Image: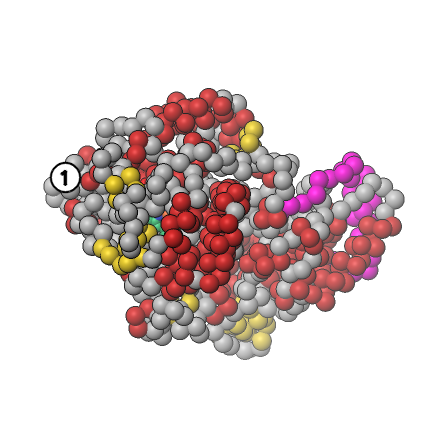
Amino acid sequence: MAECPVKHSNIGGGGTRNRDWWPNELRLGILRQHTAVTNPLKDFDYPAAFKSLDYDALKKDLHALMTDSQDWWPADFGHYGGLFIRMAWHSAGTYRTFDGRGGGGEGQQRFAPLNSWPDNVSLDKARRLLWPIKQKYGNKISWADLILLTGNVAIESMGLPTFGFAGGRADTWEADESVYWGGETTWLGNDVRYSDGKAGVEGHGVVDGDEHKKEHGDIHSRDLEKPLGAAHMGLIYVNPEGPDGVPDPVASARDIRTTFGRMAMNDEETVALIAGGHSFGKTHGAGPSDNVGKEPAAAGLEQQGFGWQNKFNSGKGPDTITSGLEVIWTKTPTKWSNNYLEYLFKYEWELTKSPAGANQWVAKNAEAIIPDAYDSNKKHLPTMLTSDLALRFDPAYEKVCKKFLEDPAKLGDAFTRAWFKLLHRDMGPRSRWIGPEIPKEELIWEDPIPAVSGPVIDEKDIAALKKEILATGVEPTKFISTAWASASTYRGGDKRGGANGARIRLAPQKDWKVNNPAQLSEVLSALEGVQKKFQGKKVSLADLIVLAGTAAVEKAGGVSVPFTPGRADATQEQTDVESFSHLEPFNDGFRNYGKSTPRVRTEQFLVDRAHLLTLSAPELTVLVGGLRSLNANYDGSPLGVLTKRPGQLTNDFFVNLLDMNTAWKATDNDTFEGVDRKTGAKKWTATRADLVFGSHAELRAISEVYGSADGGEKFVKDFAAAWAKVMDLDRFDVK
Ligand code: HEB
């Protein structure tokens, strides 16, 4: 069949596009994803539907599916458990802690690129095996939940009780374009994700194309570009054969520690996950990989979403080619055991090749004790991947292994806990978790917040508190800055951060430069004063921080701004400092903080943050314009404060930005000066995060709405709404 390159078609979105003409133009596309337009269930209440699900019946069906081998994709050892665990792990395992993106929370494994990643070979079959069950329960169970629950049930069905399960992940309906997976243009490439260490100018990647080391850095010391969580394009974590295919277990351990660390897993959790996971199933490399056809996104229509058609013999069952490795770790691949660690330490290992020619290891002087997946008369020698040997030959991993070897119950406990964390890490607060299997134990990575005790403040209290707050003598703009600093830590990907918990008064947030610690402590002590003095109901500082900002906005704009009380204050013990450190902004255009890096311009950071805050382009625009008029820069600087009456909520920012009497010129890469076109007199200063609203055609179009004669009132209204949205982003308890 002839290829049909869509770009050349003259209808249906074909042709050369803005992206092709101007590849460096600021992209706003990530701000308009997952809208009602793409969602066939737009007014659907998934949590309510999940609650009406017959959960026990679903689990029973999943248990039955495990051993219901289908001719079109037979189950190894008569049990699909290994395959389903790998499906769930690869769904959740794309999560990375730096930006909270990736993970299993959206059912993204159904879409490209993930559905076609080389690491996800054969998972197209796993999801299709699930289709009859998905079809039976319909919208009461999302794909996102089903994929993860199935992995959980697989573990249970192979003899290990799990730590629990929570549902509540609504599906998305298009590929998530917001996740940076790397800059490589070949699968399994890693030519731009390693650098010489100068990289990551404050965390964002290599300096530029030709500065990274040849051979992608030394495999013993290379630095993986942030925020990436994988050693190669198209892998979940690391190359199983060793870094860049070099079978070096110690170097493999280094890559594992980096990549699992970016999933927020420590050494113990990492060992538990790998040792636990590879207690099940097998790898697949029956023959040379050139038997395998195109991935789903490139395969023909007749394949109906499948990919990797395999010409090797039957192309399935004993002839399956997935990773190209051919390893079976334990004597009981469909039953939980401690075999994996026992064998890892019992044998010495010899480098060998799989039938597909990949590097793997075989036990020396061992007997053939490992069963075959299809032939009960056949036995194999124990085998391992390079990445498995990493657990033995890295001294820190070895120590953890030894502990689990001595006490197998500890492995079970550590594995099921780390597995639960893996699956639920990006779900956000417990108030989003649904279903009958939610564990009681509170876990630090949930970012727990105490339950609200006693009645929540009412309208009368709110009115009284606003008065008290504004009477403290603190400059109202500082309340606005603090409320913004508190709420805008939220990130939509893993639903962490936000104003609830008032963690802005705790380490590490209280010390972030962007939060202007001196000003922050002035505001907090004033609000603590209000809290102590207040005669009405008990009020949390979390509520007071937001209420203070809201009261100040109301005063500055002569507008009423919605406020939703009911937040509580977390303690320092409930706050994982290291894990919260990833929420620190190193460039925040909303507050005119930070500079462009050699790779990322300030306006791109701004769009990225707007995406984390789940804002649309109009919301982004109105918020920046408003915050500037309110004089809320992080250090009180006049950058972008394009108004003669700073502190008032006006549309002056837009009016003045669009004023043709001003000419702008760059003072450096990030800052600009605006002068009177006629007199040359200096009028304003601004940053890239300001001028982009006049320069980018789409942002300018929105700015024109707010900067027009009839735009003032709309501006104030829209700002108030967007402000309230940001303040309440984490209020899953009331949504
Ligand atoms: Fe794994 C399988 C690698 C981790 C679970 N793995 C597998 C394979 C490979 C691997 C290559 C094969 C595929 C085929 O089929 O061929 N891993 C790996 C690596 C890592 C891992 C490199 C890092 C170090 N895993 C892991 C984890 C888990 C797992 C963490 C969980 C938890 N896996 C798994 C399973 C399996 C695998 C279950 C089996 C599957 C079947 O059976 O099918």
| Snapshot colouring | secondary structure
Tell me what residue is drawn at x 29 percent, y 55 percent.
364
Task: Give the quarter of the image for residue 128.
Answer: top left
Describe residue 584's horizontal placement relative to residue 235 as left or right.
right
x, y percentage for residue 400?
A: 50, 55
Residue 571 horizontal side relative to residue 202, left or right: right
Residue sitting farthest toward the left: 1
Say which amino acid is labelled 1.
Answer: Asn
Quick one: label 1, few (<14), some, or many (20+) residues within 10 Å?
few
**Quarter containing the C terminus:** top right
Front residue of 451 and 317: 317
Q: Is residue 207 something one can see in this rendering? A: no
| Mark 1 sits near ligand 1, with its Cβ under 8 Å away | no
Q: Residue at x 57, y 56 (%)?
A: 579
Residue 673: x and y in percent read 54, 73
442 to 201, vertically: above or below:
above
* Viewer-side residue, 628 vs 588: 588
Q: Is residue 541 left or right of residue 201?
A: right
Magenta span includes 471: yes
In this view, 435 is above or below 290: above
Q: Indicate left or right for 64 with 186 as reference.
A: right
- Image quarter (top left, top right, bottom left or bottom right) of the N terminus: top left
Label 1 element class: loop
Rendering coords of residue 39 (x, y %): 42, 35
Residue at the spot of label 1: 313
**Magenta segment boundaries in residue numbering:** 447-476
Tell me, yes or no, if residue 568 can be seen here: yes
Q: Find out whether residue 461 is within the magenta segment.
A: yes
